[in-house]
């Protein structure tokens, strides 16, 4: 006989799998990026080019210049997924060992050395609020944010338990032009693009 708690867990797992299946079927047919959180599906409308993608490219290249060959700054698929928490995310840049990429399906978020996000112009709370909650919950040890709206960012580290679940204990804010350290590697932030007020793609 199943308990009410077990029934609730089974229902949550079923809802999560249904949302995940929907996201995976829409990836190639609708614009933007779809992710799954405890609140449901997040749809982030990103332009295919512009400051968001250019920042991602700069960060990937700068990281890979200072990291050993066995570590990569990966962009694109697959997602990182923790089904037990009902979370599926796709960071803009995933710092991960090559050997940990050799898996079927989604990456285990606990194998990431860091997740890097370029803050979306259309939905900044997804990066500054919900991912700041989700990433420590699924065990990503370092979360780096770069915000082209303001030319600022933050590096979050040191996951610790709280009454509301795991959270990052340490936050180091920076402004573009400073060097920043992501996990074990330090890169420059000068020359990163900013969103323009008018006539810009809506990342």
Image (cartoon, rainbow, N blue to C red):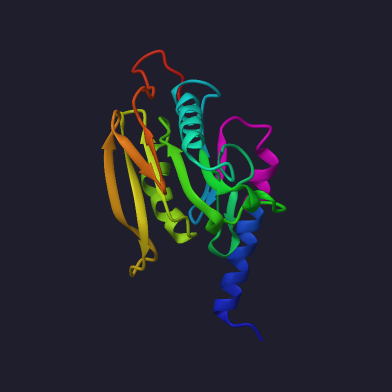
Q: Nearer the viewer, residue 55 or 47?
A: 55
Q: Residue furthest bottom?
A: 1
Residue depicted at x 67% and y 44%: 24
The quadrant holding residue 17 is bottom right
Q: Nearer the viewer, residue 127 or 153?
A: 153
Q: Is 5 drawn above or below residue 41 in the view shown?
A: below
Residue 26 at what x, y percent from top left? 67, 38
Residue depicted at x 45% and y 41%: 116
Residue 65 sits inside the magenta stretch: no
Say whether residue 178 is left or right of residue 38.
Answer: left
- Say if residue 82 shows up in the picture: yes
Q: Quadrant of the N terminus?
A: bottom right
Residue depicted at x 68% and y 32%: 29
* Span shown in magenta: 19-35
The quadrant holding residue 122 is top left
Q: Residue furthest right?
A: 104
Residue 33 at what x, y percent from top left? 56, 37
Say whether residue 191 is left or right of residue 86.
Answer: left
Residue depicted at x 54% and y 77%: 5
The quadrant holding residue 73 is top right
Q: Is 120 drawn above or below residue 10 in the view shown?
A: above
- Say if residue 42 shows up in the picture: no
Q: Residue furthest top?
A: 199
């Amino acid at each position: 006989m199943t308990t009410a708690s077990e029934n609730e867990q089974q229902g949550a797992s079923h809802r999560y799998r249904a949302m995940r299946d929907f996201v995976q079927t829409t990836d190639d047919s609708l614009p933007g990026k779809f992710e799954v959180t405890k609140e449901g599906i997040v749809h982030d409308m990103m332009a295919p080019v512009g400051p968001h993608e250019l920042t991602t490219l700069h960060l990937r290249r700068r990281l890979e210049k200072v990291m050993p060959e066995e570590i990569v700054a990966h962009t694109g698929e697959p997602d990182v997924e923790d089904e037990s928490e009902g979370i599926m995310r796709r960071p803009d840049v995933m710092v991960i060992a090559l050997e940990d990429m050799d898996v079927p399906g989604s990456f285990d978020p606990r194998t990431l050395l860091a997740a890097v996000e370029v803050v979306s112009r259309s939905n900044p709370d997804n990066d500054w609020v919900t991912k700041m909650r989700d990433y420590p919950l699924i065990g990503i040890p370092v979360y780096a944010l770069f915000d082209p709206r303001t030319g600022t960012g933050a590096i979050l580290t040191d996951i610790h338990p709280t009454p509301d679940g795991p959270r990052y204990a340490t936050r180091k804010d920076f402004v573009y032009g400073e060097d920043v350290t992501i996990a074990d590697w330090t890169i420059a932030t000068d020359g990163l693009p900013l969103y323009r007020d008018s006539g810009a793609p809506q990342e």
